[in-house]
Image (cartoon, rainbow, N blue to C red):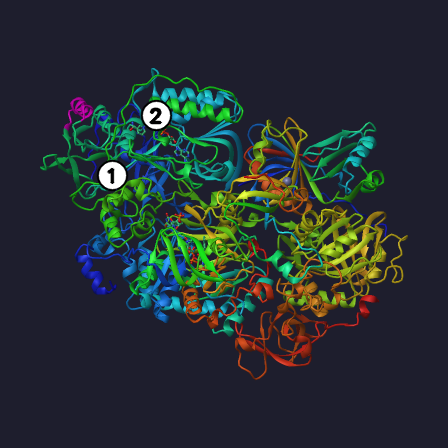
Amino acid sequence: MRYSVFSVLSQALKGNTGWKPVWREPEPKAEYDVVLVGGGGHGLSTAYYLAKNHGITNVAVVERGYIGSGNIGRNTTIIRSNYGEHGNIPFYEWSLKLWEGLEQDINYNAMVSQRGVLNLYHSDAQRDAAAQRGNTMRMHGVDAELLDVEGVRKLVPNLNFDNARFPIHGGLFQPRGGTVRHDAVAWGYARAADMRGVDILQHCEVTGIRVENARALGVETAKGFIKAKKIGLACAGRSSQVAAMAGLRLPIESHVLQAFVSEGVKPLIDTVITFGAGHFYISQSDKGGLVFGGNIDGYNSYAQRGNLPVIEEVMEEAVAMFPSIGRLRVLRHWGGLMDMSMDGSPIIDKTPIDNLYLNCGWCIGGFKATPASGWCFAHLIAQDAPHDVAAAMRLDRFATGRLINESGTGAQPNLH
Amino acid sequence: MRIPCPHCGERDVGEFAYYGDATKRRPDGASDIEAFFDYVYPRDNPAGPHRELWYHLGGCRAWLVVNRDTRTHEIFGAEVAYKAGAPGAEAGSP
Amino acid sequence: MTTTSANVGETLSRSETSTPTAGVPQPARLASGGLIDRARSLPFSFDGRKLFGHPGDTLASALVANGVKLVGRSFKYHRPRGILSAGPEEPSALVELRSGARREPNTRATSIELFDGLEAASQNRWPSLAFDLMAAGSVFSPFLAAGFYYKTFMWPASFWEKVYEPLIRRAAGLGRAPEGIDPDHYEKAHAFCDVLVIGSGAAGLMAALSAARSGARVILCEEDFRLGGRLLCERGLIGGEAAPEFVQRIEAELRSFPDVRVMTRTTLFGTYDHGTYGALERVNDHIALPPPFEPRQRAWRIVAKRCVLTAGAIERPLVFGNNDRPGVMLAGAVRSYLNRFAARPGRRAVVFANNDDAASVAVDLHAAGVEVAALVDPRPETKPSSVALAEKTGARLIAGGVVTGAIGGPAVRAVEVREANGRSSRVACDVVAMSGGFSPNLHLATHLGGRPVWDETIAGFVPGDTPRGMAAAGAARGTYDLADCLAAGAKAGAEAADAVGFQTRPSAVPQVEPQSAAVTPLWRVRGHKGKAFIDFQNDVTDKDIELAEREGFRSVEHLKRYTTLGMATDQGKTANVNGLAVMAEITERSIPQTGVTTFRPPFTPVAIGALAGHARGKEHRPTRFTPSHEWAHAQGAVFVETGLWLRAQYFPQEGDRSWFDACNREVIAVRSRVGVCDVSTLGKIDIQGADAPEFLERVYCNSWKSLPVGKVRYGVMLREDGFVFDDGTTARLGPDHYLMTTTTANAAAVMQHLDFCHQVLWPDLDVGLVSVTEQWAQYAIAGPKSRELLEAIVDREHDISNAALPYMACSEVTVLGGLRARLFRISFSGELAYELGVPCRHGDAVIRALMKAGQSLGVAPYGLEALNVMRVEKGHAAGGELNGQTTAQDLGFSRLMAMGKDFIGRAMSQRSALLDPDRQVLVGVKPLDPSARLSAGAHFVPLDVPVNPENDDGHTTSVAFSPSLNVSIGLGLLKRGRERMGERLRAVDALRGTDIRVEVCPNCFLDPEGARLRG
Amino acid sequence: MADLIATPRAALADVLRDGRYGRTDGTPGLTLCERAELSLATVIARKGQSQALAELVKSAYGIDLPSTPRFAGGQLPDGRFLIFIWAGFEQWLALAEGARDFDRELTLGLGKRALIMDQSDGRAILRLRGPKAREALAKGIAIDLHPRAFKPGDVALTTAAHIGVQLWQVDETPTYEIAVPRSLAKSLWAWLSASAAEFGYEVTSSE
Ligand SMILES: Cc1cc2nc3c(=O)[nH]c(=O)nc-3n(C[C@H](O)[C@H](O)[C@H](O)COP(=O)(O)OP(=O)(O)OC[C@H]3O[C@@H](n4cnc5c(N)ncnc54)[C@H](O)[C@@H]3O)c2cc1C
Ligand SMILES: NC(=O)c1ccc[n+]([C@@H]2O[C@H](COP(=O)([O-])OP(=O)(O)OC[C@H]3O[C@@H](n4cnc5c(N)ncnc54)[C@H](O)[C@@H]3O)[C@@H](O)[C@H]2O)c1
Ligand SMILES: Cc1cc2nc3c(=O)[nH]c(=O)nc-3n(C[C@H](O)[C@H](O)[C@H](O)COP(=O)(O)O)c2cc1C
Ligand SMILES: [Zn+2]
């Protein structure tokens, strides 16, 4: 059912009794043209763009839990394209463009809010690195501004300007960055894909990938074998396990990243802000809660929860940056499974196995990629060739050395 | 999380730095790129028991091999790396 | 809202010390009973109204005692809200406590201990609580159904950020954040014990007692300011004692054990791995201001070998129309206000409960002089217990009936009751005591992933797999009978102690009257009138759950996220089970099939500041001071943070107009005379052992074995992936003794890396490593007159002439009459230069001596700015070039690499992309216009081509104004740079609006032959 | 230049002033001082020599070199004060009072079996004593200092307020000593003094 002023009004008057399920709950078919493993943001958006851009609608999204149960449902919702590497910028910028038109495209309000993303810097060296990055962005036609401390003060007056251990020298600002309501992205893509005929199969864990003569034939699932002409993996934190079902070993470690939300308060922070003297980022949700996070806990984990050292570190950074929020209270914290690649950048590529395609390595930043990841993965699956903006995200780059290592920390995921 | 340092006793995870998969062996120095590639990049990344390297950074500065379940964080054992010896030596089995 | 006039008979007794206002009546305070101190009155204000309560009150109980019913407005519909509960589960009575920089929004009135001068204000209303214009929003409530946002606000596309979102944001978020910097301080603390007991009700007290008597180290954590839990509102006897007396006696015994720590006002907020628990102690929240030297709150990390969870149970509301009206309360809360706080929530009550325990509140009401108008018992069969209750209290028993709706605006005036025969009637009342049964308070048992299990007999979830070492007992385990709770607690406490080696038996438990906890679920009242709330705080009604089901959000997790059920500050403590049970009913699944959402820490919200503790402001991270800090400070140096270090950036002098002048002056001083700079921050690693040379061979890419004793060599270290990790000089002090220096930034990382190499990769090597960074104060003494200066302080017997100590030599010397020192003839500045290392405690004296001795030579101290200028002039790679993405080849070290040996990074440095001739390599650049100023981070683009990614040939990594050359110079990484010497390029800095033509040149701008440093 | 002399300066010279601080009523909960006049050295057993080193230490000083986190030694028969503090695997911090060129002395005595690195200036050593010492330390140190768990002679390498420290218990008063990297001593002091303020504390310049 299309959402319009008319449908909303008329339903309201009928006590909202006429709404229909936003997606069907179909039984699996015996065979699909494409089976996408993983009903997170990337699996769902891939399904949508396969249908919309490539006319491939005989598609199933196979999800072990409920859709959105993975990282799409547990991230801090920051979107931006302020990357520094040529291999990344066009991709994330394309994603940001897709976000900008998303609501109209999928007829679902995911509350894309371009409130700006500000990365603080605290030293001359950080300023120079920010300038280098911002100038690279500008070359790609991406918006970026280098603010001095006065510029930052104007934008976010309640930061710690007077008594900081690491004084704020300025910031790199991307006005078009912002936040998006995370769950709505999953639901909106699911609904839009479903409307185009995609089957969304929840509670249907993939337990095996049938491979013969280096060709993938289908997936074993909790609901039986499903044959597939092509299989796309978009399993984020569980990529290694699922790839291992086809005998692949990935340059990936799964780590836990925690996130936090405070009690709701009236508008206090209008921008997305990241701390440069640590690992901390914060924004305020439309409900009023401060949503924030920090570094990964730093060890392999599939537990979707973390421990106190990182929790305390995050809180320390919160008050270091905003000395007035110490009395606000955290109401919940949780964790997600991060597919940490060895250079900190994603992989969207074919695999050595025919008909098996790979989308993983999103580290702590794949939410913002959701639209472009789906767009490019759909392109790769449909055309058997990488999309231009994702051409650098190859699996063989680790062997050749053509890495996309934004942080310069090398093959150690907990330092990215 | 509490990591049982064989030297110092059980300590909060905050005192340690992590370095990942301990089953990886650095190839002989004369080995080719392929062997080193295999050492540096691919990971088994198991959901289950995992032998992994930790460094007691805020303590005795020993490198440890810890056997820990990545699903539950349960720790089965830990030993100092230089005693852990050849690959496959078990630091407490589940 | 009007309150009835004061009943003289019920006003409080006058306080002895009689403050002028002590006699102000509390209209709904009972004359006797309760655990309050009537002798003292505490003035407080609510929405500016001056009121009084007593020590022992919570804000909520004091409001009840003052007849205040309307306390806040709801989140979405701005409905009037009162007090629902008497504990931390409170969803409705949220206030802003305190003001200004100490304001605490969304604070539960039920958990605030009353203090003298307490200020509270209602929130989420405008202009006032009673007259809330935003309540008009209720008219639009049909549009505000669950998930309405997702379907709307899309037209026109551009309106979201500009119009809709600001409106939504302003309407959302209950309270207002504090204004200004939090003036209070916080701390963290660590505690360890054998047995941790969480909650001090009947079960917890007995658990702690049994464990304590065994000799175990016990911690008893209680969120409340008093021990006792539900016992505090029991009127029955425990082994012949009044319940509060029993509690006091046990508490006294517990406190008599030296190894028992009783922590009140302490909430256990989270269970973490391996017996680690997070707890928050509200040290001074119960008084107006923390006393000097005391924190406001303390965050504890408790490590316990065993844990007994005795956190009780949380009562559930019933779901009927307008069940959120002020005056509609949980039955247990009514009991608590009456018996513990001697506050009467109303004059005429209706009891509506589906279980025996809650129904018995009728007796407490009756005893307190509250008329019990009706006892509405929804259970189909008439319970003899209810009949007896009705008889005893004079209440009308409406067996098999339900309350379909509450009537009244700002407070309940009556309820509409539907009897078993279907007839409806109204019963006037001003308080409704409701109960839909209990949910064991099992949050802490599930934080590590344990799933709760449904227990049909108690109609509630009980802990399933508990975390290793934790056992639940009492109501938290679904045991509701008091005698059973006492026994279960004693047993669990003893077992916990026993398990960690304290042989013991459960303590004997006193006799108590048996109680019935029989319950028959009633998940919602069918055919109710008006909105029936499930989640009071997030305004989720049963209709929202129906809508979610209709739209396919049937999984509890989808239900939660779509309707926001259980996502408010109370995390659905009173709401979750009702919500999922209604979903189960609608979808005709069982409750276990429907499942539960996940509880996550914290159990109740925790202040961000408390978890940050001492680490605030300048103490956010430790600061490392250099040995010359005090001296430099006295010179008026300006300092700058470099990692944790604070270093002198420059030393301003009279006549300097800015840092720029100072920096130029310092550079010139070094280049023409002599300067001194504190470089103690460089990492220094002492490496000894027979295999030390071999070790260096393997960690550095260049060769080491040929380095003679008494010499220094520059070394480059790679990561195993083949990129440059760090660089520095290493001196051979003896045949098997080296001193390695690292960059300041990487000092710790290099040490860790070397420990890795030593312990993990090559344990067979005979080598020992220790960081001696802290031992040595190290001063760079640079400039043509540096030797002259040194000769003034180095003791005579040491020959430091050019012949005796040539470039790249080192030697042990003594200075200032016998002080042992190390002298290295190395140069970062490119001048004749030395680094002098002296033991740190003499660092201060030595810098002073150098300055004094150098006066006649025109010595100047120089800071980081000048140091950086000179290293750019010399083209040395540093931070901007050692960025983790460059190779040794990129930086011009190809010839250094000794490919014939094994070293870290050797193989991977030969990957094709790392050898690509197109790579960007280190070059120097100079502007064509000598007055132009370069900026770091500008990109190189060939002349006459568009500025676009294809033409991005690199960027400036470091720039400086060279006073020696009188021009701005830069280092940069340029594609095929070495082939492009002399080429002209643009350096485009779009961010700062500059576009400067530069010429590519070698990266060394000054004295490329190194004549000066050999001088 | 006769007027140039190398007067040593204690790490906390400019922050420690004798006196009573924090809460002023009642007896102070603890007493704090810096032990500035000590000599320190890292001693690392040469590869495969730990047994021989232990024997050498025993014969040279009569001290049983601890192989677990403990310290051993004390007043030697010749009146000097020397202890060996466990500092990691086959590694110790040797601490002496009133020694001159301590590292040289150790190298001479133990050099065959051990690597010696002078650390006399690398650490500031703080002494805390008093009934509230444990509680003050618990505000930053994440190890169990209860008398059942940590006793006189026990040693721990751990972290306090983001700073790596070495801690040992001297007696049952309790008295503790903390070794902190010299450059970080003031930050440690900022935390420790804040932690002790609640109990009232006294700073003394001598032990
Ligand atoms: C705390 C946190 C904060 C973050 N913050 C940000 C941020 O601010 N900005 C940003 O851009 N990114 C952020 N991220 C990262 C981002 O959320 C992820 O990179 C992104 O969501 C990953 O893609 P996805 O949505 O497809 O993953 P997921 O939602 O995790 O989807 C993968 C799905 O695969 C399913 N699956 C796995 N195995 C199987 C199987 N065998 N069979 C069937 N299904 C399977 C999983 O159940 C899951 O639903 C954050 C992540 C976390 C955890
Ligand atoms: N008959 C019934 O239907 C019924 C139902 C429920 C409870 N009860 C009665 O309730 C009592 C149960 O005794 P009990 O000891 O199990 O529970 P309790 O409710 O008496 O005590 C629990 C205590 O735990 C504290 N607490 C809860 N969470 C905490 C946390 N995270 N951190 C610190 N403290 C926390 C509470 O403040 C409370 O004091 C008995 O008196 C029982 O008869 C009866
Ligand atoms: C951006 C964002 C905002 C959130 N806000 C809230 C919130 O206001 N209240 C709440 O209870 N949970 C909130 N959550 C957390 C979820 O309840 C939940 O913890 C998270 O989706 C992970 O799922 P899990 O805890 O069920 O594993 C939020 C999550 C995200 C990603
Ligand atoms: Zn250790």
Q: Quadrant of ligand 2?
A: top left
Say which of marks 2 and 1 sits in front.
2
Q: Chain of mark 2?
A: C
What's the residue at 89%, 53% (across, down)? C796
What's the residue at 60%, 46% (across, down)? B54
Which one is nearer the viewer's eye here, A5 or D15? A5
Which one is nearer the viewer's eye here, C703 or A273? C703
Q: Chain of mark 1?
A: C
Q: Compared to D28, does A88 lie above or below?
A: below
Judged by its main secondary structure, the magenta piece is helix
- The type of residue carrying mark 1 is Lys
Q: Position of residue D73 (x, y in %)?
A: 75, 30
Toward which corner of the image does residue D86 lie, by quadrant? Answer: top right
Residue marked by disc 1: C69
The residue furthest right is C797
Q: Position of residue D128 (x, y in %)?
A: 64, 33
Q: Compared to C157, does A360 lie above or below?
A: above
Residue at mark 2: C-beta within 8 A of ligand 2: yes
Which one is nearer the viewer's eye here, A100 or C39? A100
The residue furthest bottom is C944
Badge 1 marks a residue whose secondary structure is: loop
Q: Is residue C393 magenta?
A: yes
Q: Which residues are magenta?
A: C383-396
Q: Is residue C469 left or right of residue D42?
A: left
Q: Is residue A170 left or right of residue A27?
A: right
- How many C-alpha atoms fall within 10 Å of the one at disc 1: few (<14), some, or many (≥20)? many
What's the residue at 73%, 31% (across, down)? D72
Q: In the rendered structure, find residue C231 and report the number of the disc placed on it.
A: 2
Quadrant location of the N terminus of chain A? bottom left
Badge 2 marks a residue whose secondary structure is: helix
